[in-house]
Amino acid sequence: MGKKEEISKRIEELRELIRFHDYRYYALDEPVISDAEYDALFRELVRLEEDHPEFASPDSPTRRVGFPPVEKFQPFEHQVPMLSLENAMAESEVFDFSRRVERLLDSHEPIEYVAEPKMDGLAVEVVYEEGVLAGAGTRGDGYVGEDVTHNVKTIRAIPWKLFSSEDSREPAPPRLIAVRGEVYLDRADFERLNRSRMDAGEPLFANPRNAAAGSLRQLDSSITAGRPLKAFFYGVGAVEGFEFETQWRMLRRLRLWGLPVNPLSRHCRRIEEAIQVYDDLSSRRASLPYDIDGVVIKVDRLDWQRVLGEKSRSPRWAVAYKFSPDEAQSRIRDIIVQVGRTGVLTPVAVLEAVMVGGVTVRRATLHNQDEIDRKDIRIGDVVMVRRAGDVIPEVIEVVASRRSGEEKAFRMPRECPSCGGEVVRLSGESVHRCLNRNCPAQIKAAIGHFASRDAMNIEGLGRRIVSMLVDEGLVASVADLYRLGPGDLESLPGFGAKSAQNLVASIEKSRQPSLSDFLYALGIYHVGRHLADILAEHFLTLDAVRGATREELESIEGVGEKVAGSVVSYFSNPGNRRLVDDLLAAGIRPGGVRSAVREEDPFWKGKTVVFTGTLSTMTRQEAGSRVAAKGAKVSESVSRKTDLVVAGKDAGSKLEKAVRLGVAVLEEEEFLRRLGS
Ligand SMILES: [Zn+2]
C-alpha cells in the first residue's frame, strides 16, 4: 500500500472512530475511552486533514466547528405538524386523561404508556434522508419553523449519519425519517457560559432553556459550535420505509440508529406506574444535570395513537404532567452589592425568606444595573423568584399590581462597598467594576477562585475561611497560603489543632498542580477552564506561557485576540509577575500539562491498582492520587483482588507476584496513555 493510501485509510478510520465514540458517549452514555483519548484522536484527524487537504470531506467530524454564516433564517416546513401538548397540573388531571383514553379506545386489552422526562429546552425536528442528516428546523408555530440545519450540524450529540447495525436482523435506517427532540444545555455548562459572559461584560441568559434557544438560533454557526449543546429525541414526524409499532420500541430503535434518547424514560403497564415515574423524577430533578419541567405520558401503541387522533392543537394520546414551578413570590427588603474577583459589582436582592423548589431562599442575584433597569426592580417590590436546580436564585419579574408607591429605585454605588475605591463602568460593558487591585473583596474572591475545585482544588478552604484569613491579616495573596502553619490557624475561631493540621495538609497537597489548573487558578481574564487546557497543551511549561508574544498566542487555534491580549497584559503587569514568582518561590511546581480529570474514567473506575518500581514522570504518591481521582482504589500489596499493577523501573517482587497471579501489568508508557497525559 502506498503512503497516500495509508494516510487516506487512517483518515477514514479516524472519522469512523470519532463517530463511534460520539455514539457511545451521547447516545448510549457509555464512553469506552477517556476524554483525553478522544481529544487525541480528534487532533490526529485535524492534523492529517490539514496536511493532506486532498482528503478533505464535507462529512468529516472536524467540520462540526461551524459553517459560513447565513444572512437570515429560511423557513423550515414540518411535513407532519409538531403539535404542543396538553398540560396536567395535578394527579387528578392525569386520571382524567387516562379515563378519556380508555373511553375512546374502548379496548379489552390493557392500555400501556410510556413516561418520558420533559426536557426544558428547545424543540427541533431533524430530517435524515437515506440515513444522512439532510435538514433541521425549530418547532416554530408547529407548521413552519426556522431552518437551523447548519447549527444543528455542530451539535456532537446529533449524528450526521444514522448507524446501521452489523447484525442483519436489525433494520437499517429508513429512506426518510424526521426525528423530533429537544436541544438543551446542562446546568453546569449554562453556569460556565454565563460566568464567561459576565467576565466579558455581555448580557446574561436567564436560564438554560434561553441559553439553548439563543445558542441554536444563531446566524453564525461557529457560535453555536462553541456552546456545549446536547439533545434527546423522543418522537418522529414524517417516515418513509419503516413502520413503528409502539412508542417504547421507537425509542429503542432511535437509540440503535445512534440518536440520544433519555435513559430515564420508562415503559408503564398502567397509568399509576407513570405517576410513580413522575413522583420519582420530581424528587430527583434538582440532582439531574439538566432542567426538566415535568413528565410526558404517551399511549404506547402507535395504532391506538392514530385512533385517538388530535384536537385542534394537541394530540389526545399524550399529556404533559408538569412539576410545581420553581418559582415563588417574595418581597425585596434591600439590595446589596457583592464584589467579585475581577472587581465586578453584582447587585443582590435580600428577600423575605421563601421556599422555592424545596429550598429556603433569602437572596437572589439581580445580575447588573441594566437588568435591574430592564425589569424595573425597586427596593420594596413584590417579585417572582426562580430557582432551578443548583442555579443561583434570581428575580424574574416584578409583580406590578402589588406596588404601593413606597418602593425605592436602586443605583449602583459610586464607591466600592469593600474598599471605598472608585466604581467605574468601562465602555462597552454592562457591569460596574472596582478598579482597586488591593480591594479586600477582590482579594478574597481571587483566593476563593484559586482554591476552588476546578482550580487548585484545596479542600476545606471555603469562602468563610478565606474571608477570615484575609481579615485577620494572615493572608494577603494566594502565595501567603503556602506559608501558613498549623500554629497560625489554631487560634482562629472554629479551628482546633486537628482542623488546622488538616487545612495545612490540603494546602500542601496542592503544591504540584498541572500547568492547566495553575493557569486557570491565576484567574487571568477570559482564561476559563477550556482555554487553560489549550494554553497548557500548546506551551507545555509556565516559562513558555509567560514569555509568549501576542502573535504567538493568536496563532493558536481557539485563542482569539481578546484572550491573547489578556494573557500578555497579565504577565506584563509587575504585580502579577511578582505574584507568580512568589508562588514559585513558595514551592509551587506546575507540572503535567493536562488537568487531572476529576471525573470518573471508565477504564479506572472501580479497579484496584498497585504501583511498584520507580516512575520516571511522577512520584508514586502523585500517580496514586491521579488514578484515585479517576475512580480507582490504590492498594499496597498484590493479591487476587488486584486488577492492575503499574510497573516502573526496577520493579521487584510485586511484579513477579502479579505475573504469577495473572494480574494485568501496565508499563509506564501505557500507564501514562491510560491516564490521558
Ligand atoms: Zn473595591
Image (cartoon, rainbow, N blue to C red):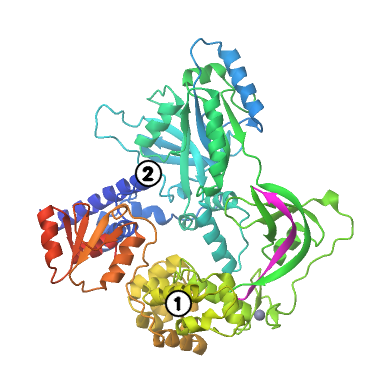
Q: Which mark is residue 504?
A: 1
Q: Of label 2 and label 1, which has the lower sequence position?
A: 2
| Ligand 1 shown in quarter | bottom right
Q: Which span is picked out in magenta?
A: 343-357
Q: Residue at x 69, y 60 (%)?
A: 363
Give the residue type that dot 1 points to: Val
* Badge 1: residue crowd in 10 Å (few <14, some 14–19, many ≥20): many
Q: Is residue 450 left or right of residue 314?
A: left
Magenta run includes residue 351? yes
* Badge 2: residue crowd in 10 Å (few <14, some 14–19, many ≥20): many
- Say above or below: 497 vs 43: below
Residue at the disc numbered 2:
160
* Local secondary structure at mark 2: loop
**Most foreground residue, 233 or 466:** 466
Displayed quadrant of residue 550:
bottom left
Q: Residue at x 57, y 70 (%)?
A: 463
